[in-house]
Amino acid sequence: MTCLRRTTGRDPGARSSACMSARHCKCHKTVPMCPQGAHAVVAGGTVVAMSRVPRTSLPDGYFHVVARGVDRRTPLFRDGTDRTGFLRLLRHAVVRYDWTCFALCVMSTHYHVVLESRQVDLSAGLQWLNGVYARHFNRRHDRFGHVFGDRFSTRVIESEEHLLEACAYVLLNPVKAGLCERADDWPWSYSLYGREAA
């Protein structure tokens, strides 16, 4: 992790040498954020740097995955054809990477998927899914460059109650965005528990 300490006589935005751990860094305290080893560097009550949880430290299990378009405003899915193509690829990924899909919602600028997977298959499958979709999207819309803004985000689901809450959250996304009145009205969502579960 890089320490972002400001030092006298230097450019205020300049980075100092890398901190190896909390006991080697006298400028900040390091606060553990999770058991897998992610840490935040805190200075004066403000988080100034935070490490990511390495994908390899995630357990096998249940995950809520979100992937967003380039700048969070650019549509990732411009129309029904884009969404249908993405869902076709997702079905292929479910079989290819041995996932169980509990819920999904395809919005305009992002998508949510709640699934069960082995950790190694989660990363490989999402890289494949997002990469193939990006190539199809660029070809179809005669464009080039990045389609996804950053790597996908992953939240570990640790209980059955959390799994049900994550599925309901995913289904209610278009309702909260004002795109429809009820979760049932959004044609680009699915839940293994049924859409009325929201």
Image (cartoon, rainbow, N blue to C red):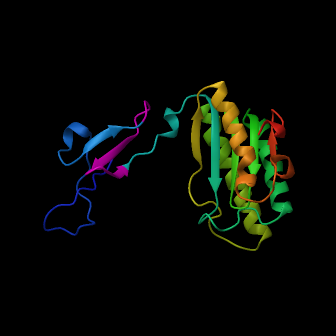
Q: Residue at x 25, y 46 (%)?
A: 19
Which of 177/65 is in front?
Answer: 177
**Which quadrant is home to the C terminus?**
top right
181 sits to left or right of 50: right
Q: Position of residue 18 (x, y in %)?
A: 26, 50
Q: Position of residue 73 (x, y in %)?
A: 64, 67
Above or below for 18 versus 82 = above
Q: Please give the range of residues in magenta.
A: 34-49
Q: Position of residue 3 (x, y in %)?
A: 27, 52
Residue 115 inside the magenta-drawn segment: no
Q: Position of residue 126 (x, y in %)?
A: 66, 45
- Image-quadrant location for residue 94: top right
Residue 36 inside the magenta-drawn segment: yes
Which of 79/197 is in front?
Answer: 197
Which of 4/170 is in front?
Answer: 170
Q: Residue at x 75, y 53 (%)?
A: 175
Above or below for 5 versus 157 = below
Q: Residue at x 57, y 52 (%)?
A: 151
Find the residue positioned furthest to the top. 160
51 sits to left or right of 148: left
- Image-quadrant location for residue 125: top right
Above or below for 150 versus 26 = below
